[in-house]
Image (cartoon, grey):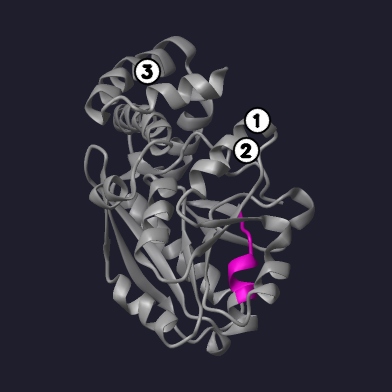
């Protein structure tokens, strides 16, 4: 029933959904207070030079955007290809596409910054090689099935994290774009390396780096910018074009350096409600 309702309201125009988002913001922030302690702690630790009033200002901007993100996610289920490409512009995508035209593959990385889900839909429409997106399955099977149906409706392939290497091997003879959200927390048993990120020791995933060094596929950072409500630009930034020549953990450090720069430019667009620093060894 809930899925039917979400699908129904997705047909409303985005301007009207943003009106609902304005109400949703007050409900989430002031009434429900969804994860406010987590968000406040994350922001305070990440910006030790900022006073409390500035932290609260970022916090409120985050929750306003978080409400927008919810309605954008809902809208995605009924978006056409033309609507997706209208709302997401891709810059420098030709440099990535050149590899596919030569029969080669590439890797992409981004964080939970901006509307990463809408960005992946746009990538699937812009590139000749279908994105293979690495993700962590969620516990609610009903919502996961619905969400994955939305994610894959234009040909994208979603791969559970534990099956990444198997899928890389299975697709090695055709051009692919494997996409990693590399700012996720590893499981406690998977913590292998810790780096400084946003002024905190941070346990990191090493899947992107391991695949890059094993396959020597070029790595691009997808730098997301929101330039208007519901509108984004993704710049494909070369992160490492010769992974086998890098030092250990160099690719991982480069990713977090770029993500940090994105966050400092507009911190409200990163997913502060995620309890990112709970597994730091």
Q: Position of residue 4 (x, y in %)?
A: 51, 22
Q: Which mark is residue 142?
A: 1
Q: Residues within 10 Å of mark 3 (few under 14, many from 20)?
A: many
Q: Which mark is residue 145?
A: 2
**Element type where label 1 sits in the image:** helix
Q: Which mark is residue 262?
A: none
Q: Residues within 10 Å of mark 2 (few under 14, many from 20)?
A: few
Q: Check contact, mark 2 vs mark 3: CB within 8 A.
A: no
Q: Check contact, mark 2 vs mark 1: CB within 8 A.
A: yes
Looking at the image, residue 160 sits to the left or right of residue 184; the answer is right
Q: Quadrant of residue 192?
A: bottom right
Looking at the image, residue 109 sits to the left or right of residue 227; the answer is right
Q: Which mark is residue 24?
A: 3
Q: Residues within 10 Å of mark 1 (few under 14, many from 20)?
A: few
Residue 204 falls within the magenta-colored stretch? yes
Q: Position of residue 40 (x, y in %)?
A: 46, 29
Q: Check contact, mark 3 vs mark 1: CB within 8 A.
A: no
Looking at the image, residue 93 sits to the left or right of residue 162; the answer is left
In the rendered image, the vertical position of residue 63 relative to residue 207, given as above or below: above
Give the residue drawn at x 37%, y 60%.
125
Indicate which label's residue lies in the foreground, 2 or 3.
2
Label located before the other in sequence (3 or 1) = 3
Rounded to the nearest whole Å, what is the CA distance between mark 2 and mark 3?
A: 25 Å
Q: Is residue 242 visible?
A: yes
Give the residue drawn at x 29%, y 29%.
57
Residue 100 falls within the magenta-colored stretch? no
Rounded to the nearest whole Å, what is the CA distance between mark 3 and mark 1?
A: 23 Å
Q: Quadrant of residue 165?
A: bottom right
Say which of 166 and 46 sits in front.
166
Instruction: Please provide the residue range marked out in magenta.
Output: 203-211
Label located before the other in sequence (2 or 3) = 3
Q: Position of residue 176 (x, y in %)?
A: 52, 73
């Amino acid at each position: 029933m809930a899925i039917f309702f979400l699908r129904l309201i997705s047909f409303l125009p985005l301007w009207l959904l943003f009106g609902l988002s304005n109400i949703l913001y007050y409900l989430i922030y002031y009434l429900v207070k969804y994860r406010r302690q987590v968000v406040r702690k994350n922001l305070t630790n990440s910006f030790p030079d900022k006073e409390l009033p500035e932290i609260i200002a970022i916090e409120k901007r985050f929750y306003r955007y978080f409400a927008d993100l919810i309605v954008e996610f809902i809208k995605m289920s009924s978006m056409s290809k033309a609507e997706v490409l209208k709302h997401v512009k891709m810059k420098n995508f030709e440099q990535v596409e050149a590899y596919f035209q030569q029969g080669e593959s590439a890797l992409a990385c981004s964080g939970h910054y901006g509307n990463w889900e809408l960005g992946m839909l746009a990538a699937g429409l812009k590139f000749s090689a279908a994105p293979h997106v690495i993700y962590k399955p969620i516990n609610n099977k009903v919502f996961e099935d619905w969400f994955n149906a939305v994610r894959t409706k234009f040909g994208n392939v979603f791969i559970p994290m534990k099956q990444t290497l198997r899928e890389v091997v299975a697709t090695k003879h055709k051009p692919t774009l494997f996409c990693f959200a590399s700012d996720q927390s590893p499981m406690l048993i998977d913590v292998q390396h810790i780096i400084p990120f946003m002024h905190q020791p941070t346990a990191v995933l090493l899947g992107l780096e391991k695949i890059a060094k094993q396959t020597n596929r070029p790595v691009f950072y997808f730098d997301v910018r929101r330039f208007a409500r519901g509108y984004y630009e993704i710049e494909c930034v070369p992160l490492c074009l010769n992974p086998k020549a890098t030092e250990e953990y160099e690719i991982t450090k480069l990713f977090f350096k770029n993500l940090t720069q994105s966050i400092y430019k507009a911190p409200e667009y990163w997913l502060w409600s995620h309890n990112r620093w709970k597994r730091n060894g």
